[in-house]
Amino acid sequence: MSEKTHALAEKLIRNFNDVKSEHDVREPLYDSHWARLAVGKAARKLGASIDTVAPGKRSCPYHFHYAQEEMFVVIDGSGTLRVAGEMLPIRTGDVIFIPPGPEYPHQIINTSDKPLKYLSISTKESPEICEYPDSGKYVASATTEEGARFRATQYAKNSVDYYEAEP
């Protein structure tokens, strides 16, 4: 393999079987492994990860994005997509499209007795606001091209007046 070929492969290709996964557990409801695929690659506007949710658990809280669009491809297993107040069955081979906005709050729940594995793909819009209808929280985040990051999570009820503490 030439030096150019090797450099291109390093920038553009990642095998999800080779990516070390992170494990996030928040008992009693959340237990998932995830492996970020686009980090360190040439992707600028897309993020991707392989997520595996333990039987009977959820991947993350019920939420919606104001800017980012998401797509999920069920690779193995079955479960439930909680979306817009409804519970939809999902299974291997399903492709799920979630546009941004409050019409589609969503959450993937493994309602089976086997692991549920899926590919998550999202746009990497910044700034972004993500809202959590069950708890009344929101996350505001922004990332610069240089990698500087701002992130704040709080309850909407804690909002202050626009001019508070200003001279």
Image (spheres, rainbow, N blue to C red):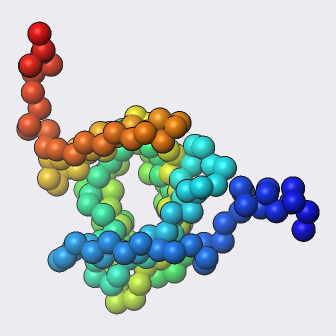
145 w.r.t. 26: above or below: above
106 w.r.t. 59: above or below: above
Residue at point 26%, 57% (across, down): 62
Q: Position of residue 33 (x, y in %)?
A: 41, 75
**The N terminus lies in quadrant:** bottom right
Residue at point 15%, 19% (across, down): 162
Residue at point 16%, 54% (across, down): 134
Residue farthest toward the front in the current orientation of the protein = 3
Specify whether residue 109 is in view. no
Residue farthest toward the right in the current orientation of the protein = 2
Count all numbered tags in the image, as a single digit: 0
Q: Nearer the viewer, residue 51 or 3?
A: 3
Asked which quadrant contains residue 89, the reply is bottom left
Residue farthest toward the top in the current orientation of the protein = 167
Q: Position of residue 49 (x, y in %)?
A: 51, 64
Side of 164 where 117 appears, left or right: right
Side of 23 where 41 appears, left or right: right
**The C terminus lies in quadrant:** top left
Specify whether residue 104 is in view. yes
Residue farthest toward the bottom in the current orientation of the protein = 113
Residue at point 34%, 39% (across, down): 150
